[in-house]
Image (cartoon, rainbow, N blue to C red):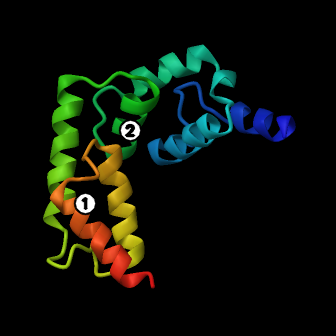
Amino acid sequence: MQLELDKILARQGSSGLWSNSPSLTYDILFALVHIGAFNLLDPTKLANLSNTLEGKFDYHSLMIKKALLGQSSIRDIAEMRTLVEEILSQQEANGSWEDTVVATAYHIERLLNLGIAKDDPAMQKAASFLLDHLG
C-alpha cells in the first residue's frame, strides 16, 4: 500500500492540486483522511493549496478549505449558503432531486457537508423519499 500512496503523493502538483482539479483533489484528500494518511502530505504543498483555492468558491474548493484546511472566510460561508439555496431550489415536491435515489442521496451528502442539519425539513423530506424508494 505504501508504494501506491507514494505514487499518489508524487502526483500532487506544486499548487497543491492533483491534475489542476479541485474535484480530484477533494476526492484524494478525503480518501487520505479516511485511511489515516493525511499526515503524509507535504506541508508546503498544503500551504500552496490554501493559496491556490483562495478566491475559488466551487463546492469542492469550499469543502477542502472548510473540512481539511479549516479556513472558511466570510465570503466562503456566504458562498456555501448560496450553494445550499441552489441545491434546495432544485428539490422536487416529493423530496427528491431528479426523482431518483442516486441524485437524492448525492444532494443529501452535499447538503450535510455544507452544514444543513439532518433534522432540517428538506432533509427529512429527502430521507422519506429514499425510504419510500429503497424497498
- Above or below, 116 relative to 10: below
**Can you give x and y, in whole percent of width and height, for residue 92 in the image?**
18, 75
Left or right: 42, with 103 as reference point:
right
To which quarter of the image does residue 42 belong? top right
The amino acid pointed to by label 2 is Met
At 53% across and 21% down in the image, what residue appears? 46
**Can you give x and y, in whole percent of width and height, for residue 97 in the image?**
27, 73
**What secondary structure is found at the residue carrying circle 2?**
helix
Q: Which residue is mark 2?
A: 63
To which quarter of the image does residue 1 belong? top right
Q: Earlier in the sequence, mark 2 or mark 1?
A: 2
**Can you give x and y, in whole percent of width and height, for residue 110 in the image?**
34, 53
Left or right: 96, with 81 as reference point:
right
Badge 1: few (under 14), some or many (20 or more) residues near its Cα, within 10 Å?
Answer: many
Give 68 or 117, whichever is nearer the viewer.
Answer: 117
**What secondary structure is found at the residue carrying circle 1?**
helix
- Above or below, 33 relative to 127: above
